Image (cartoon, coloured by chain):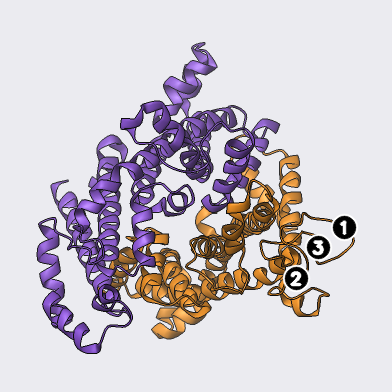
Chain colours: A orange, B purple
């Protein structure tokens, strides 16, 4: 039903009416994207219950190609003869946990700071914006590299670095949204009825800021999964033997001439996941981000 | 106008200052001190303390920072304890490689994305436009560490058009140099193509709905003339901004590609000095990249006002 609402809005906004076929074509891609995400999340959650070999022990000779017959050999084996399927499935855990947790931490801290800055303005706003600008002054990967130069790689330090990376993004988004909402009449009405700052922020502004901020979460998660993959690719991410998608590509790249599947399979999985998250994010933003519709 | 420029520049300087403090503070927390890196793992605590005193690393953090900042302003970012090469020299030695990669990648991205965006915008919503959009959102999901190996496999290993890895200097011949830089540049440019296409397509579609485009068409001008002479220029401001900002970002953002293709650029310097725990070089390179990034952003931000009269008016009002 919501699709029709979006359609109607689009037609009204643009001079040339949008052909409904466009929407349905995109919806197929979006549906497939959600399906892939559900599949990956399901695999990651149920990894321990799936009949898979351990990701750390060899199941056969190294660098076998993908083959039917055995589940463990479905995607072939890596440089050490370990099952690639098993490593992809367990690697999904790392990528998803890192993306989700760091995304949520950034969402909470950034959203909180951004709302305070947008609502109270003045000095607090200036300080928060300056700090956000300073963090954004580093190209993302450089900030992570600088952090990994002083911290020993582990899931925890990775989470700290990645969260730090996305806090300013959410701060800016929350600030912009809060600015727009606090100028609205219902906020003025609440204030005139004697509501305190805390009540206005929690009861009036937060429910409106939350959906548009949350719609960015998939896109941020996609960026985080790429960032984690980049770090692991450079050997500065998750330490072995825990599999990570970026690490698998890095391990396989020297054998790419003889055994391209070592690189292509994890690359395909990352691509599909990032693509799906981006599609989901675009879809959610079109529905929930007011700044896009105005 | 002068005031806004001064304000913007002052703000950027403040950001840069904050960045240097943050980096210095961060690195002072590093577990292995510089001295233990130089002397090796078996050094006695006494020897480490002596070397720290000689290098001035036993002083309070703030004193060290002010000292470092004073030198940095004069272009002296310290000397690497491992290679005994001044950090600034190491940076300048590697900067041309990274710059060439960034410029090549952006040029490829601009040419391809302008063509795609023009084709998209001619008939928005058509099969061609939708096809290009799908390709563009796919490219947006191809990070360099995926694009790199895939390109190597097809174009270097299978087809043999390009060298697999390595760098040829311009002094070894321009052709060789371009060949060795082409695959890495393409690997970087893929995501940029998608981003540029999205921005320019939206702006072009907006411009093509304006009255002056209708007037030009009514006068009987050819569609191609209207597109390139009338519509493209006023639609390209967001694209120029984005390209400028990304040039700044790419100066620090080619780490992956440089380490994959083993190119002697800034990113590789950073990656190797992180692995060898050369804190002084890391600090110098990170600050350098951040300063370039902030500097380019500021210039783009300001020149945007110069190029587009509408922004100037909006800022004045």
Considering every residue shown, the one lying at the far front of the view is B42
Which-is-in-front pick, marks 1 and 2?
1
Which one is earlier in the sequence, the residue at label 3 or at label 2? 2
Q: Looking at the image, which residue is at 28% across and 67% down?
A: A130
Which one is earlier in the sequence, the residue at label 1 or at label 2? 2
Estimate the spatial distance between the alpha carbons at disc 3 and disc 1, rounded to whole Å. Answer: 7 Å
Residues at marks 1 and 2 on the same chain: yes
Quick one: label 3, few (<14), some, or many (20+) residues within 10 Å? many
The disc placed on residue A68 is: 1
Relative height, residue B234 to residue A290 (above, below): above
Residues at marks 3 and 2 on the same chain: yes
Quick one: label 1, few (<14), some, or many (20+) residues within 10 Å? few
Where disc 1 sits, the SS reads loop
Relative height, residue A126 to residue A67 (above, below): below
Estimate the spatial distance between the alpha carbons at disc 3 and disc 2, rounded to whole Å. Answer: 17 Å
The disc placed on residue A43 is: 2
Name the spot of residue A72 as percent of width and height, x first.
81, 67
Which residue matches tag 3?
Answer: A73
Which one is earlier in the sequence, the residue at label 3 or at label 1? 1
Q: Looking at the image, which residue is at 47% across and 75% down?
A: A153
Considering every residue shown, the one lying at the far right of the view is A69
Name the spot of residue B100 as percent of width and height, x first.
35, 38
Q: Looking at the image, which residue is at 62% across and 52% down?
A: A255
Where disc 2 sits, the SS reads helix
Considering every residue shown, the one lying at the far top of the view is B220
Chain of the residue on which disc 2 is drawn: A
């Amino acid at each position: 039903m919501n699709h029709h609402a979006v359609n109607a809005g689009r037609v009204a906004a643009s001079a040339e009416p949008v052909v409904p076929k466009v929407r349905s074509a995109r919806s197929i891609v979006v549906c497939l994207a959600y399906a892939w995400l559900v599949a990956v999340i399901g695999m990651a959650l149920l990894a321990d219950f799936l009949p898979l070999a351990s990701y750390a022990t060899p199941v056969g000779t190294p660098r076998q190609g993908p083959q039917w017959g055995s589940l463990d050999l479905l995607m072939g084996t890596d440089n050490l003869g370990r099952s690639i399927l098993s490593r992809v499935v367990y690697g999904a855990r790392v990528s998803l946990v890192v993306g989700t947790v760091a995304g949520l931490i950034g969402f909470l801290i950034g959203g909180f700071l951004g709302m305070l800055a947008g609502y109270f303005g003045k000095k607090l706003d200036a300080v928060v914006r300056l700090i956000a600008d300073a963090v954004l002054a580093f190209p993302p990967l450089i900030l992570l590299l600088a952090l990994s130069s002083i911290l020993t790689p582990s899931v925890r330090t990775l989470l700290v670095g990645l969260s730090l990376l996305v806090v300013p993004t959410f701060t800016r988004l929350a600030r912009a949204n809060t600015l727009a909402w606090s100028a609205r009449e219902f906020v003025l009405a609440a204030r005139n009825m004697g509501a305190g700052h805390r009540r206005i922020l929690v009861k009036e502004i937060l429910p409106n800021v939350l959906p548009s901020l949350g719609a960015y979460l998939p896109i941020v998660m996609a960026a985080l999964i790429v960032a984690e993959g980049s770090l692991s690719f450079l050997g500065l991410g998750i330490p072995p033997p825990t599999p990570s998608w970026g690490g698998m590509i890095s391990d396989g790249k020297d054998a790419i001439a003889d055994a391209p599947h070592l690189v292509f399979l994890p690359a395909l999985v990352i691509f599909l996941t990032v693509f799906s998250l981006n599609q989901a994010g675009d879809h959610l933003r079109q529905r929930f981000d007011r700044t896009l519709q105005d | 106008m002068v005031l806004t420029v001064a304000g913007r520049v002052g703000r950027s300087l403040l950001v840069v200052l904050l960045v240097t403090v943050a980096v210095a503070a961060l690195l002072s927390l590093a577990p292995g001190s510089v001295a233990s890196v130089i002397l090796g793992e078996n050094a006695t605590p006494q020897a480490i303390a002596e070397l720290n005193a000689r290098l001035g690393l036993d002083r309070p953090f703030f004193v060290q920072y002010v000292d470092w900042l004073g030198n940095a302003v004069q272009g002296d970012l310290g000397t690497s304890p491992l290679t005994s090469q001044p950090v600034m020299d190491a940076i300048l030695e590697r900067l041309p490689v990274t710059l060439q990669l960034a410029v090549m990648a952006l040029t490829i991205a601009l040419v391809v994305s302008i063509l795609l965006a023009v084709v998209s915008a001619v008939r928005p919503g058509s099969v061609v436009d939708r096809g290009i959009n799908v390709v563009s959102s796919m490219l947006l999901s191809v990070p360099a560490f995926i694009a790199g190996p895939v390109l190597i496999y097809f174009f270097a290993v299978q087809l043999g058009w390009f060298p697999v890895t390595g760098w040829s200097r311009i002094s070894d011949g321009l052709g060789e140099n371009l060949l060795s830089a082409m695959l890495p540049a393409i690997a970087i440019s893929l995501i940029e193509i998608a981003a540029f296409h999205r921005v320019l397509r939206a702006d072009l579609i907006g411009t093509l709905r304006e009255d002056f485009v209708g007037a030009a068409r009514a006068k009987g001008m050819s569609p191609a003339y209207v597109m390139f002479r009338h519509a493209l220029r006023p639609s390209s401001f967001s694209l120029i901004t984005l390209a400028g900002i990304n040039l700044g970002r790419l100066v620090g953002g080619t780490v992956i590609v440089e380490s994959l293709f083993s190119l002697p650029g800034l990113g590789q310097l950073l990656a190797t000095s992180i692995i060898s725990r050369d804190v002084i070089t890391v600090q110098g390179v990170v600050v350098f990249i951040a300063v370039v990034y902030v500097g380019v952003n500021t210039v783009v931000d300001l020149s945007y006002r110069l190029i587009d009269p509408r922004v100037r008016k909006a800022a004045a009002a």
